Amino acid sequence: MHVEKFEKSAVGHMLQHYNRMTMNFGNKEIDTMRSALNYNLAPKRSMDDFSYYKQRLSQVKCQNRKDVKTLCDWIITLPKQKFTEEHEHKFFQAAYDFMMKRYGENNVVSAWVHKDEAGQSHLHFAFIPICLDRKKHIEKVSAKEVITRNNLRVIHKEMADHMERVFGRDMGILWTYVNTLDKKS
């Protein structure tokens, strides 16, 4: 699992990448013959992801600066274990449920599972980082307040615990995270 934050200027491009609306991919490891296997776990809406993103942004306070991060994307990779198609879907649904409860269903823009890239299948959980402005008691966009250092320290353990409750066993999330950190050292 890792998170990325995006400014408004990158959101359209990222949403096109998630739902494969463009055929001009920068990532050469996408097998377009397998793109039909991708699926979105986010709620079905009467509008496309970008329109929903703009609508939700219009409902909250958002500073009008170019450097404001208005979209975050948690990338959650399927652990390297043998998964049946059913268990793989259950894994991603459980990951989606955990993230949706954490960040709020209204803030979820999309949750695409990619099965068409080289390597393991993974989920792009894209959401608008919205929190409560404590002084004004209104919702506001603030990636800095939503994705804090403490949040980054605890989320892997919390996700691992959630998956253990769902599957009844350790799914290897912490092991994957620790090994990723070891490789960066």
Image (cartoon, helix red, strand yellow):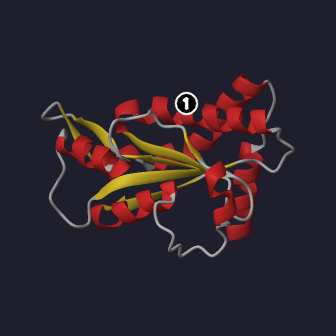
Rendered residue at 42%/52% (across/down): 72
* 22 lies left or right of 130: right
| Amino acid type assigned to the residue bearing label 1 in the image | Asp
Instruction: Give whichever of 47, 74 is nearer the camera.
Output: 47
Residue 122 in picture, x, y percent from top left: 65, 51
Rendered residue at 30%/47% (across/down): 53
Mark 1 closeness class: few <14, some 14–19, many ≥20 residues within 10 Å: some
Instruction: Give whichever of 124, 116 is nearer the camera.
Output: 116
Query: Is the residue 143 above or below the residue 164 in the image?
Result: below
* 164 lies left or right of 124: right
Rendered residue at 35%/33% (across/down): 106
Instruction: Give whichever of 120, 21 is nearer the camera.
Output: 21
Residue 171 in picture, x, y percent from top left: 78, 38
- Which residue, given by chain and number where applicable, does mark 1 sit on? 97
Residue 27 in picture, x, y percent from top left: 58, 73
Residue 70 in picture, x, y percent from top left: 31, 54
